[in-house]
Image (cartoon, rainbow, N blue to C red):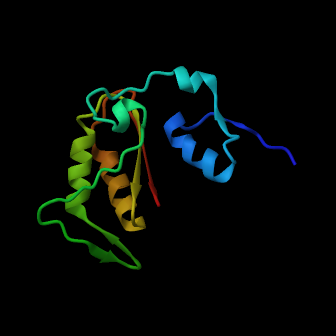
Amino acid sequence: SLLLDVQFRMHPSLAAFPSLHFYGGCLHTAEALEMESWPMSNFTWPQEGRCRAKFVAVSAKGGLEERHGHSFANAAEASLLLKTLTMLEPAKVALLAPYAAQRSLLEQGLKKMPVRPGTQISVATV
């Protein structure tokens, strides 16, 4: 079998885990990504910026999870997160929501939200 050992999609700090745990340390990041500057200087990154993944717990006062079929959504938390996103410098941002209904709520909000030119926001569930 053949192992494609260069990845082009993730910041090196994100690629480190799958490389080590799934590919025995053989997966490397393309040189262009390693040298690329990563924006959002107004956001505090872990490890003095060497890690570009950050868990941000969002807890909105009065926010309640509501059932939507077999899923859940919290409108107050989605609203708070969307408001926070308007303050970021242009960047590529991935939001990971715990439920499909929360993902849908965030996607609907993003359609109505003004974002800075150059900002790309994607939403998925974990």
- Residue at figure coordinates x 42%, y 66% from the top left: 100
Quick one: 19 or 63, which is closer to the camera? Answer: 19
Does residue 85 lie above or below 66 as drawn?
Answer: above
Residue located 63% across and 45% down the image = 19
Query: Which quarter of the figure has residue 52?
Result: top left
Which residue is painted at 36% across and 45% down in the image?
54
Q: Position of residue 67 (x, y in %)?
A: 31, 77
Residue 125 in the image: above or below residue 83: below
Residue at the limit of the structure toward the left, as seen here: 61
Front residue (pair 71, 13): 13
Total marks drawn?
Answer: 0
Query: Residue 116's spot in the image, x, y percent?
Result: 31, 30
| Horizontal relation, residue 89 to residue 2: left or right | left
In depth, the one of 59 and 34 nearer the eye is 34
Judge left or right: residue 41 versus residue 53: left
Residue 105 is situated, as x and y percent measured from the top left of the image, at 33, 59
46 is higher (above) or lower (below) than 81? above
Position of residue 124 measured from the top left corner of the image (x, y, whole percent): 46, 55
Identify the residue at horizontal 25%, vertical 50% (top origin). Answer: 81
- Quarter occupied by residue 5: top right
